[in-house]
Amino acid sequence: MKYDKFGPQKVVHVYNPKTNVKGFVVIDNTALGPGKGGIRMTPSVTPDEVFRLARTMTWKCALAELPFGGAKSGIVANDRELTLDRKEKIVREFSKELKNIVPEEYVAAPDMNMAGQEMKWFAEENGNMKACTGKPKEMGGIPHELGSTGLGVFHSGKIALEHMNRDMNDVTVAIEGFGNVGHFTAKFFEEAGANVVAASDSSGVIYNPEGLEYNKLKSTKDNQGAVTKHPSGKVLDNPKIFELDVDLLIPAAIPNVITSKNVDNVKADLIVEGANLPIPPGIEKKLHEKNVLVVPDFVANAGGVISSYVEYKGGDADEMFEMVPRKIEKNTQLVLERSERTGNYPRKEALEIAQERVLEKCDFCGED
Ligand code: NAD
């Protein structure tokens, strides 16, 4: 774990030898508010991995101007081997062990192998509904199925296109991944007039330069399990999506998809990152030098945590649909304008803005 002037402020290890529940919470920085971040349950999760994710949350919340710091937690367990009863015991035990820091210093959320049911157990055990977000609707939760992250990715892309003086109606889009983030992003772009010509999932890429209709694509995925079963278009191998002749590329599935191996084959001149770290920072810099505009992940995909904030303060879906576009548009614009002024690539500027906001309120941060 790398310690620096921002944090991590607190690392809590949980181990109960009697129940054999193991986990940890990394609270990276709470200058702007309680640390916000999901609970990841995997057999291999480590404090280092959780620290890196907590640090990303510090910057994402600061950039989205939310009264949250950054945090994350991990429970070491193999979800596939657990009975529902055992999983409930683990989540409740974890919550009980964290009562002295939740929700004052840490507000939880779902991450890998965690969803509404688990958040219900976590909040019930804590006794405070502010203990976590991502709760079921009947507990005041704002469902993931409303597509807050995809909504934000779309609005970030819209601002970037305006920044480039491009007309949405002339834009072709390719979207890697057709899960929660990817399919909502496709829907919002199509509704705004763009032409979504390629989409992919783990089965491969479907590409039709004439356009893929969102409704057809969604029903193909829902009924046949793969976008490649779409009735019209060419099926390509997954990596080919990053080399298509399109205006806008949206990676929305897995990390490290544009690397030194394929960066020279990218034809799009705008990339909006829906997934986390789809491009290593050094490669983003190279794309910037080649005049490809890249809107970084923690600027574009903050819709989910903005929705969490609405839930945390007791708001509803209408408020989420108003707040996500407003915040994402404002901060995308800020990052792109600053990048244009300084000549630095957008991730560098976004990071500096987030750090300035944290340092301004941080009375415990160290010196350089
Ligand atoms: P998801 O599980 O709902 O969907 C993932 C999609 O990616 C699926 O369609 C899957 O088939 C596809 N996929 C898997 N491997 C692929 C490959 N090699 N090539 C192309 N497609 C592939 O996940 P999600 O919630 O949509 O998240 C996608 C990414 O966005 C992740 O990196 C996640 O960390 C990030 N993210 C998600 C949210 C959110 O609110 N869901 C918020 C911020 C960031």
Image (spheres, grey):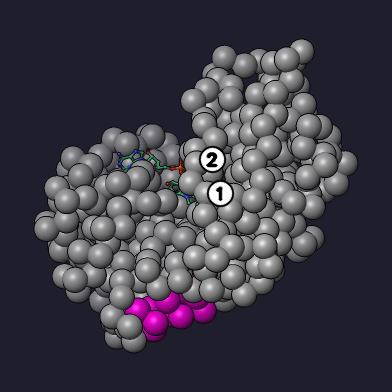
- The residue singled out by tag 1 in the image is 54
Magenta part, dominant SS: helix
Please give the name of the residue rendered at 67% of the width and 32% of the height, measured from the top-left corner: 13
Quick one: SS at disc 2? helix
Whether residue 143 is visible, yes or no, is no
Q: Position of residue 271 (x, y in %)?
A: 30, 64
* Crowd class of label 1 (few under 14; some 14 to 19; many from 20; radius 10 Å): many
Q: Position of residue 110 (x, y in %)?
A: 62, 41
Q: Residue furthest left?
A: 264
Whether residue 50 is visible, yes or no, is yes
Quick one: SS at disc 1? helix
Q: Position of residue 230 (x, y in %)?
A: 29, 44
Q: Residue furthest front?
A: 367
- In screen coordinates, is 347 left or right of 206? right
Comparing 323 with 37, the one in front is: 37
Q: Is residue 89 above or below residue 136?
A: above
Q: Whole-Å distance between the Cαs marked 2 and 1?
A: 6 Å
- The residue singled out by tag 2 in the image is 50
The residue segment tinted magenta is 328-339
Please give the name of the residue rendered at 53% of the width and 44% of the height, measured from the top-left corner: 51
Q: Is residue 178 magenta?
A: no
Are the residues at dot 2 and dot 1 in contact (C-beta closer than 8 Å)? yes
Q: Is residue 166 above or below residue 263?
A: below
Q: Is residue 168 above or below residue 184?
A: below
